[in-house]
Amino acid sequence: MAYLELQDLLDELGEDVLVQLTDNDGTGNVDEARVAKAIEYAQGVVDAYARARYSLPVPATAMVKAINLDLAVFHLVKSRSTMKEGVFEIRKI
């Protein structure tokens, strides 16, 4: 069970931003495979922490969705950035 879907990221970021974060090939479209990987990463992190205390999957409450959203966005931004002096710097597209 996914806590997050592509539409949740589109609602939060908008299509233009999601294209900037995922379109490595210059197609002008959202790369759904990269989004799926970010969602999978977020769910894995949440499940890893929740596993010790709750049975999985945990209910997809607003808080669980918000945490997954933050983690998925972080994963997408991190893949678009470089590290300079210990700080992530976003590459221009």
Image: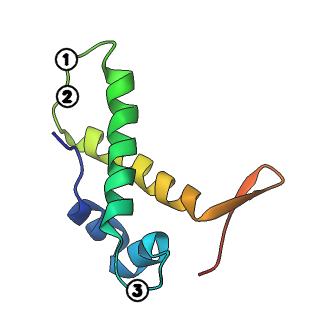
Q: Which residue is mark 1?
A: 55
Q: Is residue 15 left or right of residue 91?
A: left
Q: Is residue 20 left or right of residue 83?
A: left
- Going by the numbered disc 2, the residue's amino acid type is Val
Q: Earlier in the sequence, mark 1 or mark 3?
A: 3
Q: Which residue is mark 3?
A: 27
Q: Is residue 25 above or below residue 75?
A: below
CA distance separating discs 1 and 3? 41 Å
- Going by the numbered disc 3, the residue's amino acid type is Thr
How crowded pointer 3 is (Cα within 10 Å; few <14, some 14-19, many 20+) is rated as few
Q: Nearer the viewer, mark 1 or mark 3?
A: 3
* Residue 5 image offset from top left, x and y in percent: 22, 56
Q: Which residue is mark 2?
A: 58
Instruction: Report which quarter residue 65 is drawn in.
Output: top left
CA distance separating discs 3 and 2? 36 Å
Quadrant in which the C terminus is drawn: bottom right
As drawn, which residue projects farthest toward the right?
A: 85
Pointer 3 and pointer 2: residues touching (CB < 8 Å)?
Answer: no
- Going by the numbered disc 1, the residue's amino acid type is Ser
Pointer 2 and pointer 1: residues touching (CB < 8 Å)?
Answer: yes
How crowded pointer 2 is (Cα within 10 Å; few <14, some 14-19, many 20+) is rated as some
